Image (spheres, grey):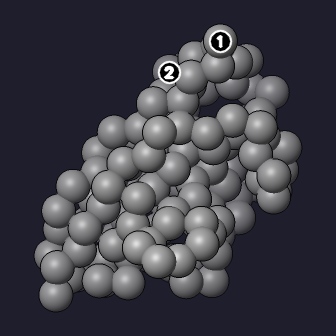
């Protein structure tokens, strides 16, 4: 059974930072691209970032490029998302996902973790 479990969400002030983590189980981590999506209230779920198998290639949404950094830890079957220079527009539920690069249609999803940024 595949499980993706997110952690690290919470409340931050504008300009602050948060770090999200996602631990994968039931999958061979090195066979998948891992990434993050987010869904703000009243909006569709959108792609945030992904990292290819073994971390060779990273892809970011334009809205987060230069502020967010994705990294994979194959030893712990974990993918992290370091979020800096946060703004209220980053408030959303963040979902971990796994599938094929560039993660247009993920095979697996986590339950999500809330990120709230106050102005």
Residue 78 visible in the displayed image: no
Q: Earlier in the sequence, mark 1 or mark 2?
A: 1
Q: Could you say which is closer to the camera, residue 42 or residue 81?
A: 42
Give me the residue at 57% from left, 59% from top: 37
- Whole-percent x, y for residue 101 in the image: 83, 50
- Place residue 6 in its image quadrant: top left
Camera-side mark, 1 or 2: 1
Q: Are marks 1 and 2 in contact (CB under 8 Å)?
A: no
Quarter of the picture holding the N terminus: top right
> Which residue is the extreme one toward the bottom?
119
Q: SS class of the residue under badge 2?
A: loop
Q: Could you say which is closer to the camera, residue 28 or residue 40?
A: 40
Q: Which residue is mark 2?
A: 76
- Whole-percent x, y for residue 83 in the image: 37, 65
Residue 25 visible in the displayed image: yes
Give me the residue at 25% from left, 67% from top: 116
Q: Is residue 49 left or right of residue 12?
A: right
Give me the residue at 66% from left, 55% from top: 50
Vertical placement of 77 versus 45: above or below?
above
Q: Is residue 79 left or right of residue 26?
A: left
- Whole-percent x, y for residue 92 in the image: 39, 67
Q: SS class of the residue under badge 1?
A: loop
- Whole-percent x, y for residue 96 in the image: 55, 45
Give me the residue at 60% from left, 72% from top: 44
Query: Within 10 Å of the Cα at label 2, are there few (<14), some (14-19), or many (20+) other Cα atoms?
Result: few
Vertical placement of 4 versus 58: above or below?
above
Distance from disc 1 to disc 2, alpha carbons, whole Å, reads: 18 Å
Q: Which residue is mark 1?
A: 1
Vertical placement of 17 versus 52: above or below?
below
Query: Within 10 Å of the Cα at label 1, are there few (<14), some (14-19), or many (20+) other Cα atoms?
Result: few
């Amino acid at each position: 059974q595949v499980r993706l479990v997110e952690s690290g969400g919470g409340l931050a002030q504008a300009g602050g930072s948060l770090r999200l983590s996602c631990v994968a189980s039931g999958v061979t981590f090195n066979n998948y691209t891992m990434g993050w999506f987010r869904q703000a209230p009243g909006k569709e779920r959108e792609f945030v970032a992904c990292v290819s198998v073994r971390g060779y290639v990273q892809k970011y949404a334009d809205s987060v490029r230069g502020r967010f950094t994705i990294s994979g830890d194959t030893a712990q079957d974990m993918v992290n998302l370091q979020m800096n220079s946060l703004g209220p527009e980053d408030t959303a539920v963040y979902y971990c996902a796994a599938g094929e690069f560039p993660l247009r249609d993920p095979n697996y999803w986590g339950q999500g973790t809330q990120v709230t940024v106050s102005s």
